[in-house]
Image: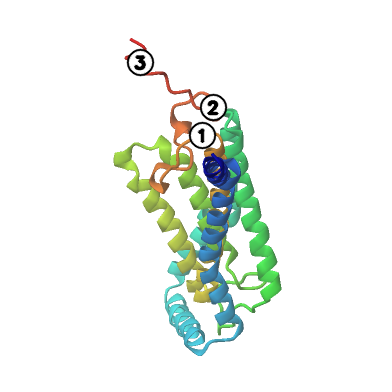
Amino acid sequence: MAQRTVRTRRLGTVRALLARHSGPDAAFGRRLVLAVTATAAVAVPFALALVLVESRWPPLYRLDRTTAERLHRTALEHPAWVGVLDFFTGVVWDPVTMRLLVAALVVWLLTRRAWRLATWAGVTAVSGALIGFLVKNAVERARPHLPEPVAHAPGFSFPSGHAMTAMTSSAVLLLVLLPLVPRAWRPLPWGLAATAVLGVGYTRVALGVHWVSDVVGGWLLGIAVVTATTLAFEAWRADTGRPRTAVSEGLEPEISCATDPEAPPAATPPSAGRGS
């Protein structure tokens, strides 16, 4: 009888431990660890780039100088091309233009009553701009000094604000709007986003206002910001019982069909044959 009592107690202890490790607190802990790990993983490349820039790593320094001088010679030989680059970097892909697109998206989401998705988009854009500004002023890297410059830009160089804004804004627009695009047409927005991100990087280096490493640093920091905010949004979806989504499906697929995209998911009806 005593042995049976001891076994019962042990079994109860094991069940209590299993319940504790499979309850909401454990789920939150697992999501928290996953979020921290993923954010750290995408932040490591930016941290490495920052270390290499600050230490003036010779291979990176040579790459920056060689690329800047080669593109500068091309710009001097083709003044009309400089005008095209200046138009795209100063109008089409300017940070103000990209942020206005995100602002318009936020307003549209608010009209759709997608409060959390609108908050995510706004927070991602604002935090990206703020973090980029703080890092730029902490590093204080000088911009390229080239003979006969074809363009000028104020402030410090690393990371490129244009590159970072293009990355964060394109990611926000993609992750929100992809569910509204038919599957057959989805390569088009991906192509537009890639063109904007890569195009901004090229124009900034070709105009002689940024080093290659500035642009890469802006891209990496933008990816880190988007990853962190996206993981937070995914945690909210998990807490409300919504399924995980793939990047190719957008951040909230329900935006394409629901009148209230943040309404709680409908309960699964019992099977028709149960109880018959």
Q: Please tell me whether residue 49 is drawn above or below residue 3 in the rendered image.
A: below
Q: Secondary structure at mark 2?
A: loop
Q: Position of residue 22 (x, y in %)?
A: 53, 43
Distance (Cα) linking label 2 and label 1: 8 Å
Asked if the residue at tag 1 contacts the one at tag 3, i.e. Cβ–Cβ closer than 8 Å, the answer is: no
Q: Position of residue 239 (x, y in %)?
A: 56, 38
Q: Residue at x 48, y 23 (%)?
A: 266
Whichever of callouts 2 and 1 sits on the residue coming sooner in the sequence is 1
What amino acid type should be assigned to the residue bearing mark 2? Pro
Residue 261 in the figure: left or right of residue 186:
right
Q: Position of residue 263 (x, y in %)?
A: 55, 26
Q: Which residue is mark 3?
A: 274
- Residue farthest left in this picture: 184
Q: Secondary structure at mark 3?
A: loop
Res. 223 in view: no
Numbered disc in front, either 2 or 3? 3
Asked if the residue at tag 3 contacts the one at tag 2, i.e. Cβ–Cβ closer than 8 Å, the answer is: no
Q: Nearer the viewer, residue 25 or 100?
A: 25
Q: Which residue is mark 2?
A: 264
Q: Residue at x 51, y 23 (%)?
A: 259
Whichever of callouts 3 and 1 sits on the residue coming sooner in the sequence is 1
Q: Please tell me whether residue 237 is drawn above or below residue 44 in the rendered image.
A: above
Q: Nearer the viewer, residue 258 or 273?
A: 273
Q: Give the numbered dot on residue 241.
A: 1
Residue 195 in the figure: left or right of residue 2:
left
Q: Position of residue 118 (x, y in %)?
A: 59, 39
What amino acid type should be assigned to the residue bearing mark 1? Gly
Numbered disc in front, either 3 or 1? 3
